[in-house]
Image: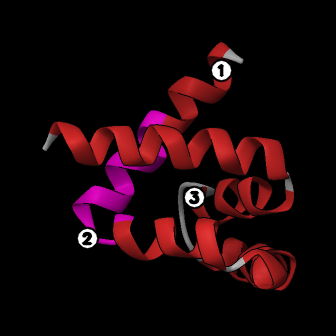
């Protein structure tokens, strides 16, 4: 779990730097039916971008438990701003 937290900190920073945290929060909350399809698209595009960020996002979308935990940490980081 500790590995996930450090990985998620990097993802949260990436989302904040690109002003994507609200969009990704919305996808995690409301996009449940489309999470699987979005994850597959992210896996498809991952080889074209450095850093394996798309793969990490895809893995989050595929796992409901991890998605909920990440959503909570993302919302907590938004409160800190």
Left or right of 6: which side holds 69?
right
The residue stretch that appears in magenta: 9-21
Please give the residue where the numbered disc 3 appears in the rendered image.
53
Q: What residue is rendered at 23% in x and 42% in y?
A: 79
For this view, does 41 lie left or right of residue 72?
right
Which of pointers 3 and 2 indicates the residue nearer the eye? 2
Q: Identify the secondary structure beneath mark 1.
A: helix
| Nearer to me, 12 or 28 | 28
Q: Which mark is residue 3?
A: 1
Q: From mark 1 to mark 3, how far is it between C-alphas?
A: 15 Å
Q: Position of residue 59 (x, y in %)?
A: 79, 55
**Which mark is on residue 44?**
none
Task: Indicate left or right for 77 with 71 as reference.
Answer: left
Which of disc 2 and disc 1 is earlier in sequence?
Answer: 1
Q: Is residue 22 magenta?
A: no
Task: Specify the label residue 19 is tagged with.
Answer: 2
């Amino acid at each position: 779990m500790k590995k996930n937290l450090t990985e998620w900190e990097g993802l949260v920073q990436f989302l904040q730097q690109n002003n994507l945290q609200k969009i990704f929060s919305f996808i995690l909350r409301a996009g449940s039916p489309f999470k699987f399809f979005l994850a597959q698209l992210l896996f498809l595009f991952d080889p074209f971008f450095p850093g394996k960020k798309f793969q990490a996002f895809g893995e989050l979308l595929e796992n409901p438990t991890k998605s909920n935990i990440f959503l909570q940490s993302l919302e907590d980081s938004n409160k800190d701003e």
